[in-house]
Amino acid sequence: MRWTATGLLVLMAGLFLVSRQFLPIHPGWGYANAFAEAAMVGGLADWFAVTALFRHPLGLPIPHTAIIPENKDRIADTMAQFLRENFLVPAVVARRMYGMNVALAVGDFLVTPNSGPDGGSERSRITGGAAELLAEVLESLDPDRLGNQVRTGLAKQFGKIDISPLLGRMLDSAIADDRHMPLMDGFIRWAGLTLEDNEETVREIIHARANAVLRWTGLDERISGSVLDGLYKLLAEVLVDPEHPLRGKIEEGLEKLAHDLQHDPKTRERVEAMKRDLLENPAVAEWWLGVWERIRQSLIRRARDPDSALGEEMRRGLAELGNALREDHRLQLQINRFARRTAVGIATRYGTQIVRLVSETVKRWDAVTITGRIESAVGRDLQFIRINGTLVGGLVGVTIHAVDSVL
């Protein structure tokens, strides 16, 4: 555009020189000469005005030229003040944010990439960045301190739960649905295997409690054998007979335990005491720290492994979050309210720091930088001013010549 404006000025100069040669031939050349002469004046005047904004015309230090480089600090302060008074005003920010649905925009962003041409890579960048951030956070935190904090938080929440009624209701429900039967069968089998592994111990106990006559006659061996055979037979009968009386006794005991867990204060207090002892046991704390460290290391490895399922889980989570933000209007209302209050709070608390950042950044630019950036933004329109000045000047010149010819 600069070359176009300059070329038009040169064209007017050429027209002026040519028209002067043909003035005696025809009166029309007088109009062309007046047009060219005034166009040169207008073009040169606007060239001077446009150039004076950014630099000294022809390098001459004419007063009130190179306006932008000479006044860049004042321009910076003016820009910052304009930004502060017209954009970073809490009322303006609130009014602008009130018309924005931030939650819906975020939801669209999280859901739409699946259908876009490069949606996969966009989503991968998001999940990859989130996974790396998660890994770095887990690595930067003190594992022992974090593990203790998590354990303390879980223990505090678990300590608030009255576990006895919960166990009682679970046991009641299991008995009502016969879900306790496999557990009872497993307990009977476990009792049989335990008895088989400890036959010698049972025989020694009976032998130690028998008197000398029984030991001398060897009856203690028969008695211990009979006792073991009777126990094996009893366990076998209970295991194969669902209607065995011993099963009924066990179920009665379980039903009473379920009732006591829910309604007996002494039983509930004993269960609560056991829970407190368990939570305060140092061995449990050591066990939890080991579990937490394994969880932490596993999360770090999965976050750093591009082939792990963590990335797919995060992608599904982001998609579900996006759908929720798009479809749940109450959630949108809450998030938009939070975003609006946050933006207003930032404008209120940090508006001065933001405009100071703008002002200081512009002031740090050198004259060449600020001139180049402003000229690249508005320079094309300024060249149109030169072109318009040339054409308008020419029209004014023709008008004056026509009026002078009439008079």
Image (spheres, helix red, strand yellow):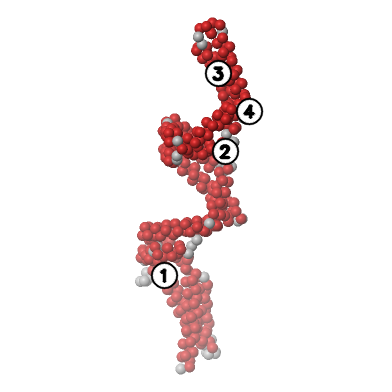
- Report, in whole angstroms, how far the alpha carbon at label 4 lies from the one at label 1: 105 Å
Q: Label 2 amino acid?
A: Ala
Is tag 3's residue or tag 1's residue first in the polypeptide sequence? 1
- Near-viewer residue (390 or 150): 150
Q: Secondary structure at mark 3?
A: loop
Q: Residue 241, labelled with which disc? A: 4
Q: Which residue lies under the disc numbered 2?
A: 176
Asked whether the viewer can see residue 279, the reply is no
| Front: mark 2 or 1 | 2
Q: Secondary structure at mark 2?
A: helix
Is tag 2's residue or tag 1's residue first in the polypeptide sequence? 1
Q: Which residue lies under the disc numbered 1?
A: 53
- Near-viewer residue (288 or 174): 174
Q: How many marks?
A: 4
- Report, in whole angstroms, how far the alpha carbon at label 3 lies from the one at label 1: 104 Å
Query: Residue 6: x percent and y percent?
Result: 50, 73
Query: Residue 14: x percent and y percent?
Result: 52, 79
| Front: mark 4 or 1 | 4
Marks 4/1 in contact by CB < 8 Å: the verdict is no
Question: Residue at 56% of width from left, 52% of height from top?
Answer: 319
| Front: mark 4 or 3 | 4
What is the crowding at mark 4: few (fewer than 14 residues within 10 Å), some, or many (at least 20)?
few
Query: Is 251 situated above or below 209?
Result: below
Query: Is 347 situated above or below 239?
Result: below
- Near-viewer residue (130 or 240): 240
- Report, in whole angstroms, how far the alpha carbon at label 2 lies from the one at label 4: 19 Å
Question: Residue at 47% of width from left, 43% of height from top?
Answer: 136
Query: Residue 246: x percent and y percent?
Result: 57, 27
- Report, in whole angstroms, how far the alpha carbon at label 2 lies from the one at label 1: 91 Å
